[in-house]
Amino acid sequence: MKYVAPLRDDEIQTLHDMHRYHPSRRARMRAHSLLLSHQGYSIPHIAHVYQVDRRSVSTWIDRWQTMGLVGLSDKPGSGRPPLLNDEEQQKVHDYLQQYPKDLKKVVQALEQETAKRVSTKTIKRLIKKTLCLEADQEIPCQSA
């Protein structure tokens, strides 16, 4: 059975901190999985706890062994690309200044100028993302 190589005290502390405070839920999950493996939990058990395939857990262990902490984070570009580019997002903010209480008008104005149709929920997510980036917070904004 495969387990993570024995961890030093400083690695354990780093993984604990990552499990508690990392802004990415997936990186927190991977750090905790390594700690569980270090405590003797099997790969199938960890996979069951997090409802992932056992090969994923095995990959996390391999990436930790070869790349360290960097191996636990998602690679850049993973995930769905944004619907709106930076320029279009700026237009949304401009429209929000014009129509602060009417997201449907923001959607209509954006569609007329860019020919892209987005939902009011997309606009709300963009507002939340912008507020989270602008806020100088110790605790990152959590996704809904």
Image: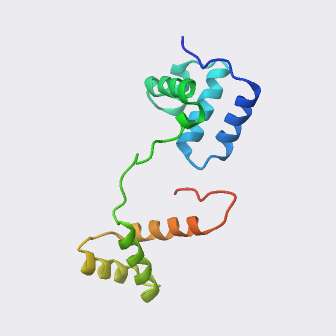
Which quadrant of the structure image shows residue 13?
A: top right
- Residue 24 in the image, given as x and y percentages of width and height: 56, 47
Q: Left of 67 or right of it: where is 87?
A: left
- Residue 42 in the image, given as x and y percentages of width and height: 57, 18
Q: Residue at the spot x=70%, y=36% of the render?
A: 14
* Up/down of 23 relative to 51, above or below: below
- Residue 27 in the image, given as x and y percentages of width and height: 56, 40
Q: Residue at the spot x=33%, y=62% of the render?
A: 83
Residue farthest along the front direction in this orientation: 67
**Residue in front for this viewpoint, 128 or 4:** 4
Viewport quadrant of the N terminus: top right
- Residue 98 in the image, given as x and y percentages of width and height: 43, 89
* Up/down of 26 relative to 57, above or below: below
* Up/down of 83 relative to 38, above or below: below
Which quadrant of the structure image shows residue 91?
A: bottom left
Q: How is the image coloured?
A: rainbow
Which quadrant of the structure image shows residue 56?
A: top left
